[in-house]
Image: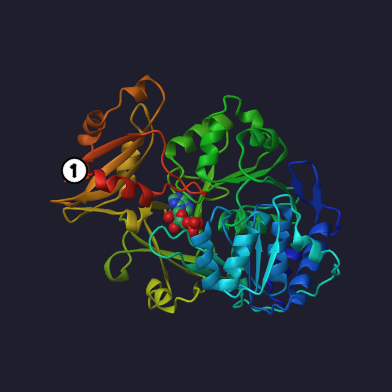
C-alpha cells in the first residue's frame, strides 16, 4: 500500500468532487475536485522541473488556496515540503536556503530579486513566484500540465516536510517529519476530536506552522469537509463566520480578542461543536470567561513542531482548565527528573514523548538529534510539566525559561498565575535576570488593565500582593509595567526578547 500522506488524505475526500473544500473570504469556493486537479498539475510541474523524490520544495508565501495546493502537490510528488514564515528577512532566508538546499524555492513576487540572489548563492536551481492573490509564475507554469498525477509511492519513514523551529535559543533547527509521523497524527486527531460529516472548520491560523498546516488542514481534508480559509485572524470576521462553522481552532490570543467584543455570546457559537486552543498556554481566566460567555468549554491540547500533538483534553469527559489533558492514543508521555527517572504525579519535571508521531530528527544535525533522544527512544521536549492524580498534564513552561535563583528552581508559571489573578492585571511574564548574588533574580513583566485598578498598580504593590503567598525566593525582586508582551505569530510570549531587553536594566 502507498504510505504517501496524500493518499491517506485523499481517501477521505468526498465522493462528489463538487463538494466544497475551501471557502474564501471573497465567496469563491475551491471544491475537492479543484484541489485535486490543481495539486495534480502542480505535482506534474515539480516533476517536469527535474526534482526527484526527497528533494525539498521551500515556500515563503502568504496563506492562499494555491499555497495549500503547493503543499499537497509537493508531498504527492514525493518531495519534502518546507514552509517558511513570510515575515522572515534576508539573513533568515539565507540560512534556511543554504541549510535545506531545496530544488525549488517558491517566493512572493515582492522579493524576487532577493530570492534570485539567495537562490544563486545556495545553488537552488528553480525559483517561481506565488503572489498574495494566488497568481504568479508558479501557477502559470502549472496551468498547461495535466490534471492527473499518480501519487508517488512513499513509505512511512520517507520525509514529507521539514519545519524550522522558531529558534528562540541558538540556531533554528529543521524538524524532519515523515509521511508516517503526519499520517499518525492526522488519524489520531480526526478520531479523538470526533470529526464528522458536515463539519465546517473556521481556519484562521497561518499555514507555515504545525497548527495551521497539519492539525487544522489534515483533520479537515481527511474528513472531506469544508473550511472557511481566511488569510488571517480577524475578530470581526470570526464573529461573522462562527455561526456558519462547527469547529474553531485558535491560539489563545484569538480567544482573548474574541472576548473583547461585547457582542460575543452564546448565540455567536450556536452551530459550533468544538473550540480547540493550543500553541501557547491558555490563561485560566480566558478559559473561565469563555465558558461563561459562550457556554462552551475550550479544549486545550499540547504539542510542538517536533511531533504534532502529544496531549489533548478529552472530547467527552471533563476538560480541565490550566491543563492540556491526557497523552493522545499512540503517544507515550513521561515526566522525568535527574537521569531521566520518571517522577510521581504532582512533581514538575522534564516532559519526554515517544510515538509514531514523533519526528525523525533535525535536518543535518545528527549530533543534536542524538542529544535530544534518550537511550530508550524518548524525545526530550524541553518543556516542563507534571501529571495530576487523574492523569491530566499541566505545562509549567520551557525548561530554558526556568529561573534558577540562589540555586533554587522557580517555575515562572506558578508566579505568573498569582500575578495574573491580581486586580488590574491583564497578564504577566516571569523571567530570570542577572543578579550579582543569586545568579538570577525572579523578575516580572506585567501588563496592566487600562482602568483604575490597572493605574493603581506599582512594582511595590505587586510585590506586596504576592509576598505572603510564595516562598521568599520566588517573590519577584523587580517588576516592570508594560502595555503588552512581545509575541510571535503563534501567540507565544517571546521571553528571550524580554530577557534581552531587561537584562541591561537589572540593578547591579
Ligand atoms: P511550536 O513547535 O512552535 O509548535 O511550539 C511548541 C511549544 O509551544 C511547546 O514545546 C510548548 O512549549 C508550547 N505549547 C504548545 N501548546 C501549548 C499549550 N497548550 N500550553 C502551553 N504551552 C504550549
Taking 237 as reference, is 50 above or below it?
below
* Above or below, comparing residue 188 to residue 359 in the picture: above
Quadrant assignment, res 268: top right
Give the vertical position of 426 relative to 145 (above or below).
above
Q: Quadrant of residue 469?
A: top left
Residue sitting nearer the eye, 8 or 70: 70
Q: Is 41 left, or right, of 215 in this rendering?
A: right
The image quarter containing residue 240 is: top right
Q: Residue at the spot x=37%, y=74% of the render?
A: 371
Percent of width and height locating residue 188: 60, 61
**Which residue does the numbered mark 1 point to in the structure image?**
507
Q: Position of residue 423 (x, y in %)?
A: 35, 27
Front residue of 170 and 352: 170
Q: Secondary structure at mark 1?
A: loop
Residue shown at the point (27%, 67%) measured from the top left: 338
Q: Residue at x 73, y 70 (%)?
A: 7
Colouring scheme, one of rainbow, by chain, secondary structure, one colour: rainbow
- Specify whether tag 1 is near ligand 1 (CB below 8 Å): no
Whether residue 388 appears in this view of the structure is no
- Of 27 and 85, nearer the camera is 85
Q: Is residue 230 left or right of residue 275?
A: right
Question: Residue 482: where, in percent of width, then height?
Answer: 36, 34
Q: Is residue 16 left or right of residue 154?
A: right
Q: Position of residue 103 (x, y in %)?
A: 65, 74
Answer yes or no: is residue 179 visible: yes
Q: Locate the N terminus and report the quarter of the image it occupies.
A: bottom right
Amino acid at each position: 500500500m502507498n504510505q504517501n500522506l496524500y493518499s491517506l488524505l485523499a481517501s477521505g475526500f468526498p465522493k462528489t468532487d463538487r463538494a466544497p473544500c475551501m471557502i474564501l473570504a471573497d465567496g469563491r469556493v475551491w471544491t475537492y475536485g479543484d484541489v485535486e486537479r490543481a495539486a495534480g498539475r502542480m505535482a506534474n510541474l515539480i516533476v517536469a522541473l527535474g526534482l526527484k523524490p526527497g528533494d525539498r520544495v521551500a515556500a515563503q508565501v502568504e496563506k492562499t488556496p494555491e499555497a495549500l495546493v503547493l503543499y499537497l502537490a509537493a508531498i504527492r510528488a514525493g518531495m519534502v515540503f518546507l514552509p517558511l514564515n513570510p515575515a522572515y528577512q534576508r539573513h533568515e532566508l539565507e540560512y534556511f536556503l543554504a541549510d535545506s538546499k531545496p530544488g525549488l524555492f517558491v517566493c512572493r513576487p515582492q522579493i524576487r530579486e532577493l530570492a534570485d540572489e539567495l537562490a544563486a548563492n545556495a545553488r537552488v536551481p528553480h525559483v517561481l513566484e506565488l503572489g498574495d492573490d494566488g497568481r504568479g509564475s508558479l501557477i502559470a507554469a502549472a496551468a498547461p500540465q495535466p490534471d492527473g498525477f499518480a501519487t508517488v509511492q512513499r513509505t512511512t519513514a520517507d520525509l514529507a516536510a521539514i519545519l524550522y523551529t522558531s529558534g528562540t535559543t541558538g540556531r533554528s533547527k529543521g524538524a524532519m517529519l515523515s509521511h508516517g509521523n503526519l499520517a499518525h497524527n492526522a488519524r489520531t486527531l480526526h478520531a479523538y476530536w470526533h470529526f464528522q460529516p458536515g463539519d465546517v472548520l473556521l481556519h484562521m491560523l497561518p499555514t507555515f506552522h504545525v497548527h495551521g498546516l497539519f492539525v487544522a488542514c489534515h483533520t479537515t481534508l481527511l474528513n472531506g469537509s469544508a473550511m472557511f480559509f481566511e488569510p488571517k485572524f480577524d475578530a470581526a470576521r470570526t464573529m461573522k463566520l462562527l455561526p456558519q462553522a462547527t469547529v474553531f481552532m485558535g491560539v489563545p490570543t484569538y480567544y482573548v480578542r474574541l472576548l473583547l467584543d461585547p457582542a460575543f455570546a452564546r448565540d455567536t457559537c450556536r452551530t459550533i461543536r468544538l473550540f480547540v486552543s493550543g500553541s501557547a498556554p491558555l490563561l485560566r481566566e480566558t478559559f473561565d470567561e469563555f465558558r461563561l460567555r459562550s457556554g462552551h468549554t475550550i479544549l486545550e491540547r499540547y504539542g510542538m513542531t517536533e511531533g504534532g500533538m502529544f496531549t489533548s483534553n478529552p472530547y467527552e469527559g471533563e476538560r480541565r482548565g490550566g491543563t492540556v489533558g491526557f497523552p493522545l492514543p499512540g503517544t507515550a508521555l513521561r515526566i522525568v527528573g535527574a537521569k531521566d527517572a520518571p517522577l510521581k504525579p504532582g512533581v514538575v519535571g522534564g516532559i519526554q514523548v515517544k510515538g509514531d508521531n514523533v519526528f525523525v530528527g533535525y535536518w543535518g544535525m545528527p549530533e543534536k538529534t542524538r542529544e535530544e533522544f534518550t537511550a530508550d527512544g524518548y524525545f526530550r521536549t524541553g518543556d516542563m510539566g507534571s501529571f495530576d492524580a487523574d492523569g491530566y498534564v499541566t505545562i509549567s513552561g520551557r525548561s530554558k525559561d526556568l529561573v534558577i535563583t540562589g540555586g533554587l528552581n522557580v517555575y515562572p508559571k506558578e508566579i505568573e498565575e498569582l500575578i495574573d489573578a491580581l486586580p488590574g492585571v491583564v497578564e504577566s511574564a516571569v523571567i530570570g535576570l542577572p543578579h550579582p548574588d543569586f545568579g538570577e533574580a525572579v523578575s516580572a513583566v506585567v501588563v496592566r488593565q487600562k482602568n483604575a485598578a490597572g493605574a493603581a498598580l506599582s512594582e511595590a504593590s505587586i510585590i506586596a500582593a504576592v509576598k505572603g503567598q510564595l516562598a521568599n525566593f520566588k517573590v519577584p525582586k523587580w517588576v516592570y509595567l508594560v502595555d503588552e508582551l512581545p509575541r510571535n505569530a503563534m501567540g507565544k510570549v517571546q521571553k528571550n526578547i524580554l530577557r534581552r531587553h531587561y537584562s541591561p536594566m537589572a540593578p547591579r
